[in-house]
Image (tube, rainbow, N blue to C red):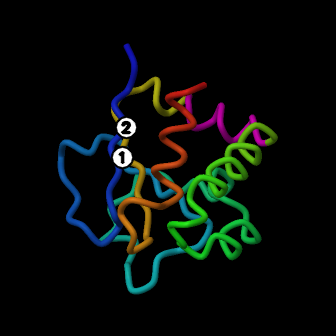
Amino acid sequence: MTARIQIKRVYDKASSEDGMRILVERLWPRGVTKAKAKLGLWLKDIAPSAGLRKWFGHDPVKWEEFKKRYWCELRHNQPAVENLRAYMKKGNVTFVYAARDERHNGALALREYLERT
């Protein structure tokens, strides 16, 4: 059985249907307390590198190149990927992210990578 991967902004209300809520950001989201985030896990090492995040700057024009570069980082970071997959084997997960852009963010790119590999 494959875990269902949902994507949610950290600023959206948590739900009992979220399963394990995993923050997939390198930096803690502004203005959110740990209690309000209701996370089960924070995987900093799975997030895009600081340099890649800064280069991307959530520019939709750079989206396809961002994904290629991020996926390259993930291929070279298999311990973090395998750690995440171990949690996914336990049930449904929700990747929690902080970006304003709901169509171009690291959580979406991560889910796509995991679905392709």
Q: Which of the 4 quarters of the picture holds residue 103?
A: bottom left
Magenta stretch: residue 41 in it? no
Asked if the residue under mark 2 is in contact with the one under mark 1, i.e. CB atoms within 8 Å, the reply is: yes
Magenta stretch encompasses residue 79: yes
SS of the residue at dot 1? strand
Q: Nearer the viewer, residue 51 or 103?
A: 103
Picture quadrant where residue 82 is located: top right
Q: Secondary structure at mark 2?
A: strand
Point out residue 40 in the picture as x, y percentages from the top left corner. 41, 51
Residue type at mark 1 is Thr
Residue at the spot 59% in from the left edge and 73% down from the top edge: 27
Q: Pointer 1: what residue?
A: 94
Judged left or right of residue 6, residue 66 is: right
Q: Which residue is mark 2?
A: 5
Report the residue at 34% width, 64% height from top: 9
Quarter of the image with the C terminus is top right
Q: Position of residue 71 (x, y in %)?
A: 68, 44
